[in-house]
Image (tube, rainbow, N blue to C red):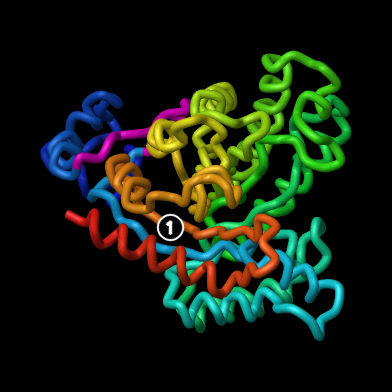
């Protein structure tokens, strides 16, 4: 329940405080009249429009497993090259429904024509398909590089994100995942930044993300900045970037397998209060030689932060010749569901 802004016609104002043309109430008086309701509901009068802060949540943790379509990267890529091979997004949605996921994250790369927006007919089809399957669309994601010294690369990324913000709004997806790290052809952010100091890179990255967030706010979408183990390898680095962006429409996408520290659970705990979306990985450093995720420990951290929303699973081949996304996703899903049940209450 949301308290409406001050309005002389508001039925929430007591009759004996009804405004008149001769003695309109001051703004403090109008707020005072609403204090009993605010106290009863626990709702604040407003939220700062541009101050980065932990996401305010009510009702305790509520965790819903989702599937990130990127888990089917190889099969989706094969299908894009030859429709007789692999699987398409509609088939990935069918798989998600059969496994009784609550939602699906539809990565933008796999839409026809990416990075351009798909045509309306395609968007309408997949939106209806997910609805008929009982699946929400938990988000989408794009490729961008805001670590690049070449401003043209950053400008291109901003435009792609703005386009996909509007696609997300059409789909009813609440968030667009964007990268906070370098992308090919660069091997790392230092190469991409041409030797620029970290402080300068973070500043121009924050400027680009803030511009995207301003656009996203107009469409009711959140820019979800993802750690990917390069420029953002620690929780402190992730938080530093978000604080510099300082916009309520830019929050964290926490990739559980892409903090590069010795104790990534500590990084996850630091960012969990700011998370608007997740990528739940099967291992802690997204490598076959790194420890498998302690799902119960992870879920306990997420619960402690009071997170309410989807937990998209994203599995990776990690160069495994025998990788079968359908098998691996089901394995991780079973672990996640068991952890949710074990930590409930």
Q: Compared with residue 73, is residue 34 higher up or lower down, i.e. above or below? A: above
Out of 51 and 224, give the one closest to the viewer. Answer: 224
Q: Is residue 52 magenta?
A: yes
Out of 86 and 118, give the one closest to the viewer. Answer: 86
* Rendering coords of residue 240 (x, y %): 54, 22
Report whether 49 appears left or right of 285: left
Report whether 79 appears left or right of 36: right
Out of 4 and 197, give the one closest to the viewer. Answer: 197
Residue 219 visible, this orientation: no
* Rendering coords of residue 74 (x, y %): 73, 67
Q: Compared with residue 87, is residue 165 higher up or lower down, i.e. above or below? A: above
Q: Quadrant of the C terminus?
A: bottom left
- Give the magenta part as a residue range: 42-55
The residue to which callout 1 is attached is: 310
Does the magenta stretch mainly form a helix, a strand or a loop?
loop
Residue visible at 72% across and 75% down in the picture: 122
């Amino acid at each position: 329940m949301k308290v409406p802004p001050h309005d002389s016609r508001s039925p929430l104002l007591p009759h004996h405080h009804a405004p008149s043309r001769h003695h309109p109430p001051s703004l403090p008086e109008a707020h005072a009249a609403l204090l009993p309701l605010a106290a009863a509901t626990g709702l604040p009068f407003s939220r700062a429009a541009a101050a980065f802060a932990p996401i305010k949540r009510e009702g305790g943790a509520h965790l819903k497993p989702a599937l990130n379509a990127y888990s089917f990267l190889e099969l989706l890529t094969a299908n894009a090259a030859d429709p007789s091979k692999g699987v398409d997004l509609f088939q990935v949605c069918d798989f998600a429904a059969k496994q009784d996921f609550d939602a699906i994250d539809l990565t933008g790369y796999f839409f026809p024509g990416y990075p351009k927006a798909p045509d309306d007919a395609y968007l309408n089809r997949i939106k209806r398909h997910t609805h008929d399957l009982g699946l929400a669309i938990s988000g989408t994601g794009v490729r961008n590089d805001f670590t690049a010294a070449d401003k043209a690369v950053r400008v291109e990324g901003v435009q792609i994100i703005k386009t996909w913000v509007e696609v997300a709004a059409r789909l009813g997806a609440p968030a667009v995942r964007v990268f906070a790290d370098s992308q090919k052809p660069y091997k790392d952010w230092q190469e991409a930044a041409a030797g620029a100091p970290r402080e300068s890179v973070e500043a121009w990255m924050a400027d680009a993300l803030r511009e995207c967030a301003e656009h996203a706010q107009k469409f009711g979408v959140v820019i979800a900045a993802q750690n990917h183990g390069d420029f953002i390898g620690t929780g402190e680095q992730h938080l530093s970037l978000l604080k510099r962006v300082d916009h309520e429409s830019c929050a964290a996408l926490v990739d559980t397998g892409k903090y590069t520290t010795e104790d990534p659970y500590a990084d996850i705990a630091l960012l969990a209060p700011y998370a608007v979306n997740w990528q739940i990985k099967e291992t802690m450093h997204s490598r076959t030689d790194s420890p498998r995720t302690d799902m119960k420990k992870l879920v306990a951290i997420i619960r402690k932060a009071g997170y309410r929303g989807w937990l998209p699973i994203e599995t990776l081949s990690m160069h495994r010749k025998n990788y079968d996304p359908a098998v691996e996703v089901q394995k991780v899903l079973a672990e996640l569901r068991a952890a949710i049940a074990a930590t409930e209450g």
